[in-house]
Amino acid sequence: KAGVTQTPRYLIKTRGQQVTLSCSPISGHRSVSWYQQTPGQGLQFLFEYFSETQRNKGNFPGRFSGRQFSNSRSEMNVSTLELGDSALYLCASRFNTEAFFGQGTRLTVV
Amino acid sequence: GENVEQHPSTLSVQEGDSAVIKCTYSDSASNYFPWYKQELGKRPQLIIDIRSNVGEKKDQRIAVTLNKTAKHFSLHITETQPEDSAVYFCAASFNYGQNFVFGPGTRLSVLP
């Protein structure tokens, strides 16, 4: 079984731009969650999608949004990028309790 | 909402010694507590988990204990090895896996 795949692996964007990250979950997993990982803040929960519906949301501004498609693939969008958005963005898919993480997308905002 | 604290933030032990990492959570509705290990440059991976109806769980050299009354749970690693060096994250979630809230992480260094 293929693992969780995130694309792209690396991104460099300029302040004010927007970005879309993609996450393909493990086949059969309907839950996809997104996390922001920074050295000082650890793993911060962004949101969780299940069967195309956002089920939970963390404390991030509205510039961060996401969606999930009928094949369970998920995208995360960040608009009006700020320097502080530079981080590793991880998604995780889940069937039961265990969350399986992707390799992450490292976003650098300059 | 849920808040998870984790201590210590860094921990150095000699190879062969034991390591203990402690976490506390705030929401009594949380019922699932996993521990993830993240090696440098790699993705977090589950190493052990415990549900709220269990007080202790062990898997070879690692064990987790849960005290629901005090709202804290701990990771115990015995006979540490250099390959145990990593960042360890605890987490709490409700409904057995929804909305994971992670602790800030513990950087464990096992010195040969």
Image: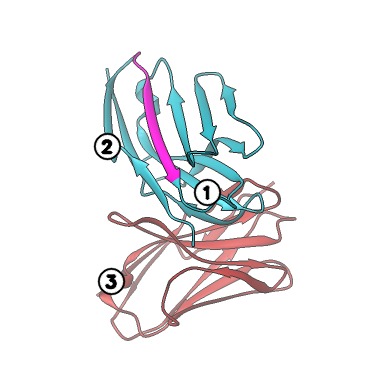
Chain colours: A red, B cyan
- Same subunit: marks 1 and 3: no
Give the camera-side residue of B26 and A33: B26
In the rendered image, the quadrant that contains the C terminus of chain B is top left
* Chain letter of the residue carrying label 2: B
- Which span of residues is magenta-colored? B16-24
Secondary structure mostly seen in magenta is strand
Give neighbour class at mark 2: few <14, some 14-19, many 20+ (Cα, 10 Å): few
Residue A57 image point, x, y percent: 53, 70
Instruction: Residue A84: give its label.
Output: 3
Vertically, is A84 above or below A40? below
Residue A9 located left or right of residue B95: left
Residue A69 image point, x, y percent: 68, 74
Q: Earlier in the sequence, mark 1 or mark 2?
A: 2
Residue A31: in magenta span: no
Vertically, is B88 above or below B4? above
Instruction: Residue B10: give its label.
Output: 2
Q: Residue at left 52%, top 25%? A: B63
| Amino acid carrying mark 1 in the image | Ala
The quadrant where residue A64 appears: bottom left
| Amino acid carrying mark 3 in the image | Gly
* Chain letter of the residue carrying label 3: A
